[in-house]
Image (spheres, coloured by chain):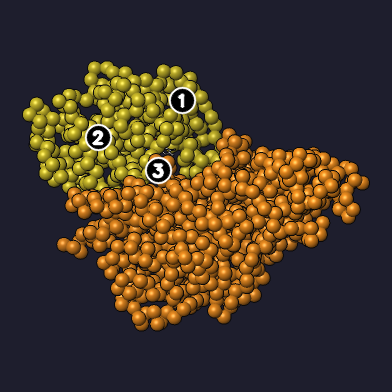
């Protein structure tokens, strides 16, 4: 089929797109019939356990595996020696000197965080592998750990990576507009120090790998639950002494990810080495303690912020120095320290911004691209800043937000960093959310409640969920990075019996891609979603993929669906060509309905199977020049440009969903405990393909944000470097009892940049971090308490209250 | 997270269980497993012999005898929570059991198990101390009664000998004009307490406080009685000033631990706050 055959403008009737059908995946996942990595059993398979470092920072002086090797049932043990035989260090995306940073899938010479893998054992049973780990003798020389980004910058701080010579692995200043002028013209300058804490994804299914090396063919098959395995292929391919054409990666159903499962390529390699050494397939299923300790936490960040403002609350400009604590290795970093660039002024319209960005290594677990990656920290910082602007000027925070929001008529809006906000109406969304919690009523009651000693407060925030990223933004980290743009591949075919099959090669872990793809395809072919089969899971030998493939960064409804639409149109075009020949009509006079192709306005039709029959089995009847078969591939490319390296601007993301949250909380002044009395969300992700699934994502993201604001924190000991929140007894995953009823309403601002008007929705940006901090501050406003941390457990609030009360006395 | 290997033994009587305990060093009774199995999986405990008593018949019951309620060792938290006898005659024990973990845990965990585990932040031990309860311990040389105040000795340590089992748990039938409350401060529902308070208040016919029993959880190596608070209540009309003043004494004699959910200082302050709240609640529950 030639490009000329493709008419770009096949109208897509919207019958199924926009309909809240039940997800196809739900019955199997809810009734326990999902198939995960742990369900895979291969004959002769061994089970692995990892020995992890008890120290946050120590030299490895000696590893003796001899006792462990003698334990009956132990087949192979991998330590740094084996890894060095198979691997080069992972490539880094930072400029010198940090590009020299050495990172492998196991600790080499030194351990750099408590929980870092030091040895891997394969045995006939998992229990034996765990017993064997206890028999491995490792002699460590403990070194002082560095557990704080600011400490790490001091000249006498211990070095996490001697080979780099500094703990500051990336530093860059971004200057947009005229910041100095903004500060010169300001009526007031507000300064704040803020801290965004470490929390994470903690998915139901932890990391898992089954590695199967076939000596005969030399093929290594890796079953895993990585969210973007083919992006990771670049890391695997460049560091593994294995021909990449012989590496096959399969992901079955995945039990949650939240970004944490992007980093599992280290485990994919370690377990593969173990399998090759053992000469047998090996399964490794991470346990919960390992999952919590191994890093894959979100970026921790400290901000020194200054805001230049007018008396009426107009923000003229912001300067911020940010210190990102990225943990012991860079892995995906320093991207998280850069991604504020997608939402540089947040929902606000100030033009002048100076960001002094620092990424710093410490002896904590390495961070991962966790939900809201890099943007949440920045959006939360802006939200805190704007609220303090209001409070310090004696203005209402809500009014100040509304005043500074980008106006709907300004969309598409180019933010200071060059990121273009595609569409939306921020003021209306915020007002709507406030209405849903009866804002006016609470404000009226509030003074009386304060008089009664009840600290009730209202908070509202709006965060964007920027989606479909332009990989070229990493060139602002290092100009030589060989990535840009974004793309997805889809393959689609009609089989000999007229059935439609789609292979998208995404790695969904709760986003129901099978359902939304079938809805979109159903509309193109005039069938129902049940008539469309979407191949579950991902197999690099089955699905087409590009270096951007995967499920991450709020984009399937744009990039994945872009590829699906492209493929669907291609396939439809070819079917139309054959059908036109059979019906002796023009392709443009045909319509697709109910599994048939018909001449519009007549009952002259051919069924899909009849067309397919010609294409597959009866090809002498095909029209001249038409290639047999009905199978197409389409690769979607995002319409991005390369960054301006001089100005450091980039159109970093294609779409901007957003959520406005409003809540009412009550703070118990005697204990510091926060109770949520009401919670409302207004979501706008453009055209929802399936509103039901969108609602699920909105609830999930809201819960994730409430969890982060009030319950979940990876606390480390400053002295020993140990992770103190090391089990679910201390890493407090909230339950249904802690999460209030969440009222949800929607707005639809179609994206002008995507074919269906869709936007990404997966991350949702954890807005409760903003709304709850604001509500607590509002509740305690009679005491003048300023919330400066994104995590607010009871004791922290209790202490702030006591201090404020002392000051007042 | 798989335990080290162990031998599994399943006696059919408590006598046999005691014999096995006596015979094998490094042996442990397995009841509901809600504490023991977790410790074994974390490899913090690695008994060589597990003596599973859960199949022994007749060890789950709640009976009233005289002014005591007798509870079988395998009685689950759920049964304790929902037993009409306990609800009517000793409601604070029901209330404490209802606050343990979640329903699955309450379906399996047992009253003797939580007492023998002796976690100072657990719900039932604190309440048991306020109730002046007792356990009947059975060893190879016979039985003995251990009072609550003697039972808890240190973190996770009781007065039981290694070869003794708890055969029965006893708590009093509470007298009339008694109000009780068990409350805890925890980050989430179902978490172990940052601070817990069990309060039992009995008034005389003139509404003067005849007896007060206040016990605190999670503020020391064992549950602790707040003796000074009790003394500040007994013999007085319990006005709110009296309650507030008495509660201020709740930090006397405690030695709270520090962890990421609460520093020692914070726990000491919360001991006062929750003592005040527990006394108020207990008082409000005294019927005519
Ligand atoms: C997720 C989770 C949350 C929890 N939350 C709470 C909570 O909020 N509050 C709370 O109080 N508890 C909580 N618990 C602990 C729970 O109460 C346990 O059930 C209880 O501590 C132990 O009872 P068990 O029957 O399960 O005992 P097991 O775990 O079987 O045994 C515990 C110990 O007691 C010994 N033992 C048991 N029975 C006897 C006996 N008859 N004689 C002598 N020794 C005996 C065992 O040898 C062992 O040392 C929680 C547990 C879990 C897993």
Which residue in the protein does label 1 denote?
A: B53
Quadrant of ligand 1 in image:
top left
Image point (19%, 38%), residue name: B280
Q: The orange chain is which one?
A: A
Q: Is mark 3 on a helix, strand or loop?
A: loop
Disc on res. B181 = 2
- Viewer-nearest of labels 1 and 3? 3
Q: Position of residue A558 (x, y in %)?
A: 61, 56
Q: Can residue A563 be seen in this view?
A: yes
**Which quadrant is home to the C terminus of chain A?**
bottom left
Q: How far apart are marks 1 and 3 (CA)?
A: 43 Å
Using the image, name the chain to which the residue with label 3 belongs.
Answer: A
Q: Colour of chain B?
A: yellow
Pointer 2 with pointer 1, Cβ within 8 A: no
Q: Distance between the residues labelled 2 and 1?
A: 32 Å
Q: Where is residue B213 in the image (x, y as percent from the top left)?
A: 20, 35
Which residue appears farthest toward the right when viewing the image?
Answer: A620
Disc on res. A741 = 3
Which comes before the other along the chain, label 2 or label 1?
1
Q: How crowded is mark 1: few (under 14 residues within 10 Å), some or many (20 or more)?
A: many
- Does the Cβ of the disc 1 residue fall within 8 Å of ligand 1? yes
Q: Where is residue B28 in the image (x, y as percent from the top left)?
A: 46, 32
């Amino acid at each position: 089929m030639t490009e000329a055959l493709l008419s770009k403008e096949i109208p897509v009737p919207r019958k199924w797109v926009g309909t809240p059908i039940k997800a196809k995946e739900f019955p199997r996942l809810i009734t326990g019939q999902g198939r995960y990595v742990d369900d895979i059993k291969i004959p002769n398979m061994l089970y692995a356990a990892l020995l992890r470092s008890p120290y946050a920072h120590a030299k490895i002086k000696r590893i003796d595996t001899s006792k462990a090797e003698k334990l009956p049932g132990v087949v192979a043990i991998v330590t740094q020696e084996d890894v060095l035989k198979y691997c080069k260090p992972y490539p880094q995306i930072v400029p010198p000197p940090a590009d020299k940073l050495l990172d492998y899938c196991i600790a080499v010479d030194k351990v750099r965080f408590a929980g870092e893998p030091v040895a891997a054992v394969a045995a006939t049973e998992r229990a034996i592998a765990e017993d064997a780990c206890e028999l491995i003798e490792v002699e460590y020389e403990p070194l002082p750990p560095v557990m704080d980004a600011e400490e790490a910058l001091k000249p006498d701080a211990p070095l996490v990576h001697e080979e780099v010579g500094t703990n500051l692995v990336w530093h860059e200043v971004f200057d947009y507009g005229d910041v100095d002028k903004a500060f010169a013209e300001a009526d007031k300058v507000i300064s704040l120090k803020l801290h965004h804490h470490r929390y994470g994804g903690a998915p139901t299914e932890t990391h898992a790998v089954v590695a199967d090396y076939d000596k005969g063919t030399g093929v290594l098959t890796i079953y895993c639950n990585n969210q973007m395995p083919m992006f990771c292929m670049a890391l695997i391919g460049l560091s593994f002494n294995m021909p990449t054409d012989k590496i096959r990666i399969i992901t079955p159903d995945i039990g949650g990810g939240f970004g944490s499962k992007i980093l599992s390529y280290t485990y994919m390699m370690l377990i593969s080495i173990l399998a090759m050494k053992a000469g047998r397939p090996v399964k490794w299923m991470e346990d919960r303690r390992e999952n919590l300790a191994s890093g894959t936490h979100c970026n921790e960040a400290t901000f020194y912020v200054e805001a230049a403002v007018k008396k009426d609350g107009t923000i003229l400009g912001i300067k911020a120095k940010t210190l990102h604590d990225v943990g012991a290795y860079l892995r995906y970093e320093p991207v998280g320290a850069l991604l504020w660039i997608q939402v540089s002024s947040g929902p606000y319209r100030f033009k002048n911004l100076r960001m002094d960005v620092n990424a710093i290594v410490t002896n904590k677990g390495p961070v991962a691209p966790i939900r809201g990656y890099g943007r949440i920290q920045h959006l939360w910082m802006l939200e805190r800043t704007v609220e303090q602007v209001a409070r310090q000027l004696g203005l209402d925070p809500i009014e100040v937000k509304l005043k500074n929001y980008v106006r709907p008529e300004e969309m598409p809006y180019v933010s200071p960093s060059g990121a273009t906000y595609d569409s939306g109406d921020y003021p209306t969304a915020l007002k709507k959310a406030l209405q849903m919690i009866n804002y006016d009523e609470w404000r009226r009651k509030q003074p009386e409640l304060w008089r009664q000693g009840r600290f009730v407060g209202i908070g509202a925030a709006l965060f964007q969920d920027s989606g479909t990223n332009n990989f070229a933004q990493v060139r602002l980290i290092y100009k030589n990075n060989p990535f840009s743009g974004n793309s997805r591949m889809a393959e689609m075919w009609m089989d000999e019996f007229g059935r439609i099959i789609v292979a998208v090669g995404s790695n969904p872990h709760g986003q129901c891609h099978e359902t939304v793809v079938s809805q979109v395809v159903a509309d193109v072919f005039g069938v129902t979603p049940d008539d469309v089969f979407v191949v579950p899971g991902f197999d690099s030998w089955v699905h087409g993929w590009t270096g951007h493939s995967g499920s991450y960064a709020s984009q399937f409804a744009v990039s994945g669906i872009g590829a699906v639409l492209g493929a669907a149109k291609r396939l439809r075009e070819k079917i139309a060509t054959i059908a036109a020949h059979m019906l002796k009509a023009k392709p443009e006079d045909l319509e697709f309905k109910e599994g048939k192709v018909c001449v519009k306005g007549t009952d002259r039709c051919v069924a899909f199977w009849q067309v397919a029959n010609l294409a597959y089995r009866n090809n002498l009847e095909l029209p001249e020049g038409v290639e047999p078969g009905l199978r197409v591939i389409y690769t979607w490319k995002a319409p991005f440009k390369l960054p301006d390296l001089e100005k450091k601007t980039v159109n970093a993301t294609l779409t901007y969903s957003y959520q406005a949250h409003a809540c009412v909380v009550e703070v118990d002044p005697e204990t510091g405990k926060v109770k949520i009395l009401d919670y409302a969300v207004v979501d706008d992700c453009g055209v929802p393909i399936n509103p039901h699934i969108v609602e699920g994502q909105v609830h999930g993201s809201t819960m994730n944000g409430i969890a982060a604001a009030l319950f979940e924190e990876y606390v480390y000991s400053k002295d020993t470097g140990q992770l103190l929140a090391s089990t679910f007894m201390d890493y407090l995953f909230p339950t249904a009892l802690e999460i209030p009823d969440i009222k949800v309403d929607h707005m639809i601002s179609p994206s002008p940049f995507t074919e269906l008007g869709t936007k990404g929705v997966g991350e949702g940006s954890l807005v409760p971090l903003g709304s709850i901090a604001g509500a607590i501050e509002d509740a305690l406003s009679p005491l003048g308490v300023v919330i400066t941390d994104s995590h607010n457990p009871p004791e922290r609030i209790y202490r702030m209250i006591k201090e404020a009360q002392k000051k007042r006395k | 997270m798989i335990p080290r290997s162990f031998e599994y033994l399943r006696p059919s009587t408590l006598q046999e269980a005691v014999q096995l305990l006596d015979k094998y060093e490094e042996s442990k009774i397995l009841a509901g497993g809600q504490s023991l199995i977790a410790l074994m999986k974390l490899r913090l405990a690695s008994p060589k012999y597990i003596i599973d008593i859960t199949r022994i018949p007749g060890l789950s019951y709640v009976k009233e005898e005289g002014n005591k309620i007798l509870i079988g060792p395998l009685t689950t938290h759920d049964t304790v929570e929902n037993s009409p006898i306990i609800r009517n005659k000793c409601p604070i024990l029901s209330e404490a059991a209802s606050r343990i973990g979640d329903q699955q845990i309450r379906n399996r965990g047992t009253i003797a198990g939580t007492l023998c585990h002796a976690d100072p932040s657990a719900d039932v031990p604190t309440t048991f101390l306020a109730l002046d309860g007792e356990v009947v311990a059975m060893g190879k040389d016979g039985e003995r009664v251990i009072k609550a105040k003697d039972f808890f000795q240190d973190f996770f340590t009781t007065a039981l000998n290694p070869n003794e089992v708890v055969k029965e748990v006893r708590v009093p039938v509470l007298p009339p004009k008694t109000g009780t409350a068990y409350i805890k401060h925890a980050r989430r529902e179902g978490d172990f307490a940052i601070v817990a308070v069990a309060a039992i208040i009995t008034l005389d016919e003139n509404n003067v406080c005849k007896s007060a029993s206040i016990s605190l959880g999670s503020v020391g190596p064992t549950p602790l009685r707040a003796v000074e608070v009790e003394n500040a209540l007994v013999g007085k009309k319990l006005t709110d000033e009296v309650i507030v003043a008495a509660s201020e004494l709740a930090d006397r004699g405690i030695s709270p631990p520090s962890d990421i959910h609460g520093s020692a200082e914070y726990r000491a302050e919360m001991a006062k706050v929750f003592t005040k709240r527990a006394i108020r609640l207990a008082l409000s529950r005294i019927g005519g």
